[in-house]
Image (spheres, grey):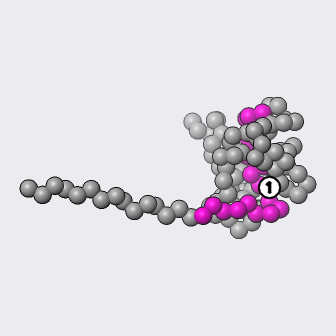
Amino acid sequence: MKQPSHQQAAPLSMPPPLACRPGCGACCIAPSISSPIPGMPDGKPAGIRCIQLTDELQCAIFGRPERPACCGGLAASEEMCGTGREYALQWIGKLEEMTRPDALF
């Protein structure tokens, strides 16, 4: 009797990560952040610019341990970033609205 062969599935092809768009900063403005941020010990509400967002719209604490884990876990994607900053602000803002605790029930 022939034994079933176990073939390994081909690895899934993941698209390369999308680089942040210069001059955007949408992910540092649109979402609420409940974790402490240096200069914002209570986090930040949705739609409020993070105090760590520079005038060049870059994170001043990028790659540093005090950067909230939720920030490090948010990666640019075509779905989220779309065609430009306004699209990203609206998309993240809509996601924020849909996931508010009072919107879930």
Q: Position of residue 33 (x, y in %)?
A: 74, 39
Task: Read off the magenta span.
Answer: 16-36
- Residue 37 located left or right of residue 56: left
Q: Position of residue 38 (x, y in %)?
A: 84, 36
Q: Is residue 40 left or right of residue 87?
A: right
Circle 1 sits on which residue?
A: 25
Is-magenta flag for residue 12? Answer: no
Residue at 80%, 63% (x, y): give it: 22
Quadrant for residue 86, please give it. bottom right
Can you give x and y, in whole percent of width and height, for residue 11 in the image?
Answer: 44, 60
Amino acid marked by disc 1: Gly
- Secondary element under disc 1, as helix, strand or loop, is loop
Name the residue located 77 percent from the left edge and 42 percent from the top edge. 64
State whether the magenta stretch is mostly helix, strand or loop. loop
Please give the count of numbered marks on the rendered protein: 1
Residue density around tag 1, few if under 14, some if 14–19, many if 20 or more, within 10 Å = many
Residue at 71%, 68% in the rendered image: 83
Q: Is residue 18 visible?
A: yes
